Image (cartoon, helix red, strand yellow):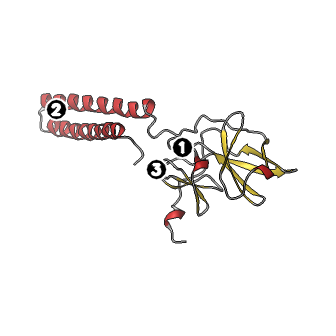
């Protein structure tokens, strides 16, 4: 659902290569137990080749194609209180993108209650402000991942990493935000989907 056809084919080849390698190492062990050391070595070499090719394919998917990569891992965001917008400029009940020096933030306002998350989806980088709000979650318009607006926790995949969230305060009509956690080490766990529960 979240990968293109070529990426999916490479992913299947990666998985099959790993399974072949595991089966090969098991067969090699059995052959060596039956005193067929030469056959065991050959099977082991074939399994090693399969594992190497599968590892290369997995690396290609991750490093070249960005499959399974947290797209917000290296975004810093403001660590000190920073004015990001005026409260009056942010429409109510409408996800809004606000650019800072470092990142684009998603601001969602209900009256004077404001929440701020990073706007770029951790899954594949989709613009969250373009997605709908459902049951307290922002839904990515690209692959339908849902994140809790209050915490950034994943409520529905395919995303596996939470959205970076920000501490927020309103001072003299200005919305100020700062990153509430350091770097890529997240405290937010993946939780059950509140979207799959009846309202």
Q: Are the two marked residues, 3 and 1, in contact with CB atoms closer than 8 angstroms? A: no
Q: Earlier in the sequence, mark 3 or mark 1?
A: 1
Local packing at callout 2 (Cα closer than 10 Å; few below 14, some 14-19, many 20+) is many
Graded by Cα atoms within 10 Å as few (under 14), some (14 to 19) or many (20 or more), the crowding at tag 3 reads some
- Front: mark 3 or 2: 3
Residue 197 drawn above or below residue 40: below
Which residue position is annotated with label 2?
40
Quarter of the picture holding the C terminus: bottom right
The residue lying toward the viewer, choosing from 127 and 39, is 127
Return the mark for residue 158. Answer: 3
Which residue sits at x=58%, y=53%?
153
Distance from Cα at disc 1 to Cα at disc 2 = 49 Å
Q: Nearer the viewer, residue 51 or 116?
A: 116
Structural crowding at the residue carrying mark 1, measured as other residues with C-alpha within 10 Å and reported as few (<14), some (14–19) or many (≥20): some
Please state which of the two labelled residues, at mark 3 or mark 1, is closer to the viewer.
1
Depth order, front residue of 115/173: 173
Measured in 3D between alpha carbons, the distance from the residue under mark 3 to the one under mark 1, in whole angstroms, is 12 Å
Q: Which mark is residue 126?
A: 1
Task: Please state the horizontal and vertical placement of residue 12, each as a whole percent of the image.
Answer: 30, 41
Q: Secondary structure at mark 1?
A: loop
Residue at the extreme bottom of the image, as rendered: 199
Residue 113 in picture, x, y percent from top left: 75, 58
Outermost residue on the right side: it is 172
Which of disc 2 and disc 3 is earlier in sequence? 2
Q: Nearer the viewer, mark 1 or mark 2?
A: 1
Q: CA distance from mark 3 to mark 2?
A: 40 Å
Give the secondary structure at mark 3: loop
User: Does residue 170 sit above or below 136 in this rendering?
Assistant: above
The residue tagged with tag 2: helix, strand or loop? helix
């Amino acid at each position: 659902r979240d990968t293109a056809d070529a990426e999916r084919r490479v992913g299947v080849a990666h998985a099959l290569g790993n399974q072949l390698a595991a089966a090969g190492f098991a067969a090699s062990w059995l052959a060596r137990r039956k005193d067929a050391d030469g056959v065991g070595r050959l099977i082991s070499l074939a399994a090693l080749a399969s594992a190497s090719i599968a590892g290369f394919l997995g690396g290609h998917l991750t490093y070249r194609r960005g499959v399974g990569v947290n797209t917000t891992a290296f975004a810093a965001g403001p660590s000190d209180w920073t004015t990001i917008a005026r409260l009056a400029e942010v429409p109510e009940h409408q996800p809004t993108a606000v650019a800072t020096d470092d990142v684009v933030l998603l601001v969602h306002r209900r009256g004077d209650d404001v929440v701020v998350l990073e706007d770029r989806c951790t899954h594949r980088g989709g613009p969250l402000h373009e997605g709908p709000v459902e049951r307290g979650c922002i839904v990515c318009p690209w692959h339908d991942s849902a994140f809790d607006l209050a915490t950034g926790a994943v409520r529905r995949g395919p995303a596996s990493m939470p959205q970076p969230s920000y501490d927020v305060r309103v001072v003299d009509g200005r919305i100020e935000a700062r990153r509430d956690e350091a770097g890529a080490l997240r405290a937010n766990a993946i939780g059950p989907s509140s979207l799959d529960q009846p309202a």
